[in-house]
Amino acid sequence: MEAFSLHPDVYATGPVNGLLRMLEHVWTKEATPGEGTFYIVSGFANYNGGVRFFEVFRKHIQAGGRIVAFFGGSTSQRLSSRQIVRELLNCGVEVHLINRKRLLHAKCYGTSGVAGERLIVTSGNFTGPGMGQNVEAAVILDQATTSSMHFSWDQMIANMLSQSWNHYTPSLADLKAPAWTLLYDESARKVMLDESEESTMVVLLGHADTARIQADPGTNAGKGTQYFWLSKDCYDFFPPLTIKNKTGRKATFSCLVNMFYVDLVSVDRKCRVTFEAENNLDFRLAAC
């Protein structure tokens, strides 16, 4: 398949609408766990950029596959986070950090294997905004096209490693190594958005939601799900979803957010947002 897309939901030449859907296509629908190598090259990276694929990566590597990632790193700029790198290393991904005066700014993803090379070239970083609401363009190229171009992931990676760049390979065995100083801490920042960066999520409640909320406690009308279901593309609206479920067979990733109820003039500081990574890929907000 070859296709072009401008997301979110702006324009697409085929059925795969957006960068996230293209990545799902090459890393889940077309890939067999354990076969071949997945590639990630991105100047910026954060936890929610990868949360859709952590379990996919883990299973691919456990089955004998390989994943190679290159990210930008800096001691002075917020390029890639400690949280995303630690999670990828926990999955078994080979992570490389590039620190240089002219920042690593390329964004491309794909696979290589017996069937050939798949390549996605895009403006979207491996971040929540890059996967969600940023306006990003992406082109996906199939094996026939990459073959006609003589494209090779192995050769490109080899050439990147041969450059005289400051190159680091972080390890979980030494969290005080120089590589970790190139990564920022997502949990440490205070959220202060410029007005031009603010965005609004509108949650529309159905009849079942409003009936449950207004019902008397203990009545049949009050029964039902205790969650509000959100869009499947909310990756950039929430803090890093680093809280993993400890029960159940299917992986979920959550975070806690403050909810301000205007009419009640009340704040709930422990509302849980959860991403169902191995179920229906939805985000859900706990009904506090």
Image (cartoon, grey):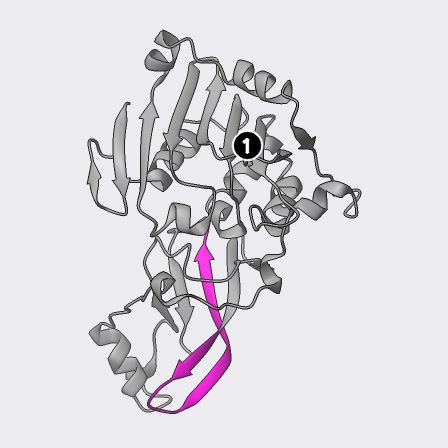
Overall secondary structure of the magenta stretch?
Answer: strand
In the image shown, does 179 or 271 lie closer to the viewer? 179
In the image shown, does 126 or 256 lie closer to the viewer? 126
* Vertical relation: 35 (above or below) 78: above
Q: Secondary structure at mark 1?
A: helix
* Vertical relation: 59 (above or below) 176: above
- Residue 139 locus on image (x, y percent): 31, 29
For residue 21, what is the image quadrant? top left
- Residue 230 locus on image (x, y percent): 33, 62
Residue bearing the label numbered 1: 60
* Vertical relation: 264 (above or below) 49: below
Magenta segment, which residues?
258-277
- Residue 273 locus on image (x, y percent): 46, 66
Which residue is depicted at the point 48% across and 42% down? 53
* Vertical relation: 149 (above or below) 214: above
Which residue is depicted at the point 24% across and 70% down? 204
In the image shown, does 115 or 6 lie closer to the viewer? 6
User: Magenta stretch: residue 274 in it?
Assistant: yes
Tell me if residue 220 can be seen. Answer: no
Which residue is depicted at the point 60% across and 36% down? 101
Which residue is depicted at the point 40% across and 24% down? 119
Give the left or right position of residue 13, taking residue 234 as reference: left
Q: Looking at the picture, which amino acid does disc 1 mark?
A: His
Quarter occupied by the N terminus: top left
User: Magenta stretch: residue 230 in it?
Assistant: no
Quarter occupied by the C terminus: bottom left
Q: Residue furthest front?
A: 101
For residue 99, what is the image quadrant? top right
In the image shown, does 56 or 21 lie closer to the viewer? 21
